[in-house]
Amino acid sequence: MDRQARANALVRATLSLGDAVLRARYVTSVAHAAPIAALAQTLDAICERAEQAETASRETLIAIVDALNGDGMDALIQRLREAAASDSLLALERLIRIPPRARPTSTTPPRDPRAPDGREGGGRPVPLGERKSLARRPDRETLQRMLRDPHPDVIRRCMSNPRLVEDDVVRLAARRPGQGDALAEIARTRWVHRPRVRIALVMNPATPLEVVARLVGLLLRPELAMAAHSPGVAAPVRALCLEHLVRRPPVNGTDPSKPDLQ
C-alpha cells in the first residue's frame, strides 16, 4: 500500500468516528502500532492535503494534532522528526517542528503575580489537592479564582468544569504574562478546537513553541496572515505562519505574503 492509500485509509477510519476524543485515541493507537517510516509518510501525505484545504484531511489533521498533544507522545514525535528530516517530508516537518529558540517547558512555572498564592483568604496555604478539587466545583466564583492558579494540574481540572465557557478559555489563553505549562494544558483539551482559543494560544508568546507549531497547521488563511504579520508573535512563529500561508490555495488571486482578511 502506497502513502496516499495509507493516508486515505487513516482519513476514512478516523472520520468514521463521530467523537473527537475517540478520533484522537484512534490516531494515537495507530501511531504507536505503525512502523515509524510508514507512519511518517502517511502523516506527511495528510499534512500536504490539509495545506491545500482538502476538507477531509483538514478534519483528520485536527485528530492528529490532538493525538500528538497528548501525554506520553514526546518520544514518538522525536522519531517522527528524525524520519521527516531523513526523507524530506516537509509538510510533516512543519507540523512537528521545534522552532528556533524553543525552550523546554518548565514543570514549575514562575508565579503570575496576579494568580492565587495557594492561600485561602490570605490565610492558610491551600494544598494542591484541595485546589484541584476546588477547580471542579460548579460555581462561577470559585472557577474564576482557580483559573488564575499557576499550576497546570489545577488548570487541567478547570478545563473540564461544566461551568466553563469559551470566553473564560480565550481570556486564559491570551493572558500576559502566560504560564507555558498551563497554556499547553489548554492545547490538550477540546477547547483547542475553537478557533478563538487556537489563535489566542498561537499569539501568546508564552505558549511552548512546539505546541504552537502543531496549532499553526490548523489555522485558516486569515488567521495565518494575522499571526504572520503581528509584531507580538515570536519571529520563528511568524516565519512558520508564512510558510503555511504560501502553501494555501490563493483566495481571489491574493498575494499570500500579504495580510489576507477575507
Image (cartoon, rainbow, N blue to C red):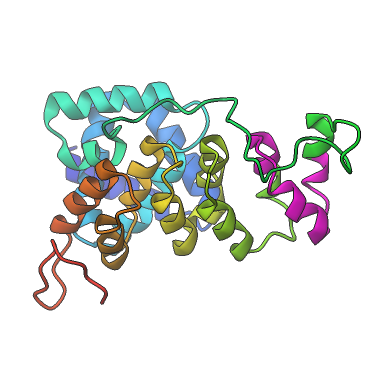
Q: Quadrant of residue 67?
A: top left
Q: Give the residues drawn in magenta, as a range.
A: 133-156
Residue 153 drawn in magenta = yes
Left or right: 22 with respect to 46?
right
Name the spot of residue 196 as percent of width and height, x first. Answer: 47, 63
The front one of 43 and 15 is 43
Which residue is pictured at 53% across the width and 30% down the height?
Answer: 71
Q: Quadrant of residue 57?
A: bottom left
Quadrant of the image for the C terminus? bottom left
Name the spot of residue 243 as percent of width and height, x first. Answer: 17, 49
Residue 21 drawn in magenta = no
Which residue is pictured at 45% across the width and 35% down the height?
Answer: 28
126 in relation to 144, above or below: above
Residue 14 appears in the picture as rendered: yes
Residue 16 appears in the picture as rendered: no
Which residue is pictured at 16% across the width and 35% down the height?
Answer: 89
The front one of 24 and 224 is 224
Left or right: 74 with respect to 42?
right
52 in relation to 11, above or below: below
Which residue is pictured at 56% across the width and 48% down the height?
Answer: 189
Name the spot of residue 112 as percent of width and height, x first. Answer: 62, 40
Quadrant of the image for the N terminus? top left
Name the spot of residue 84 as percent of width and height, x first. Answer: 20, 30
The front one of 219 and 170 is 170
The image shows a total of numbered marks equal to 0
50 in relation to 39, above or below: below
Left or right: 200 with respect to 98?
right
The front one of 222 and 5 is 222
